[in-house]
Amino acid sequence: MEQRRCPDCGVTMEPTPVRDGEGMKLTIRTGKRDGLLGKLGVSDSARLQAVCCPECRLVRLYAEDDD
Ligand SMILES: [Zn+2]
C-alpha cells in the first residue's frame, strides 16, 4: 500500500486497523455495477483500510478489493 499523506498536515498517515465491536474487519457493499466502486474488482464487497494522521488525528478510510 502506497504512503498516504494528510491533506492538512502533509505528513505520512499511519495505517490503522479498523474493527467493529466483535473484532471483525469492516467491509462495505460495493455491488457489481459500474462506477467508481465497481472498478475495485469483481468482488461485491471491499475491505476498509484506515490511515490515521499522527499530527491532527484525521482518519481516512479507503475501500480495498476483498478477494
Ligand atoms: Zn493531519
Image (tube, rainbow, N blue to C red):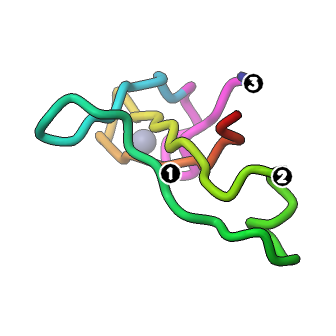
- Residue 43 lies left or right of residue 58; in this view the side is right
In front: mark 2 or mark 3? 2
> Which is more N-terminal, label 1 or label 3?
3
Residue at mark 3: C-beta within 8 A of ligand 1: no
Give the Cα distance between marks 2 and 3: 22 Å
Q: Main secondary structure of the magenta part?
A: loop
37 left or right, relative to 57: right
**Camera-nearest residue between 17 and 42:** 42
Amino acid, disc 1: Asp
Q: Dot 2 lies on which element? A: loop
Per the image, is 63 magenta?
A: no
Assign a secondary structure to mark 3: loop
User: x%, y% of residue 2?
Assistant: 75, 24
Q: Mark 1 highlights which residue? A: 8
**In-image side of 39 versus 63 (left or right):** right
Q: Which mark is residue 42?
A: 2
Front residue (pair 7, 46): 46
- Whole-number angstrom distance, CA of label 2 to CA of label 1: 34 Å
Residue of label 3? 2
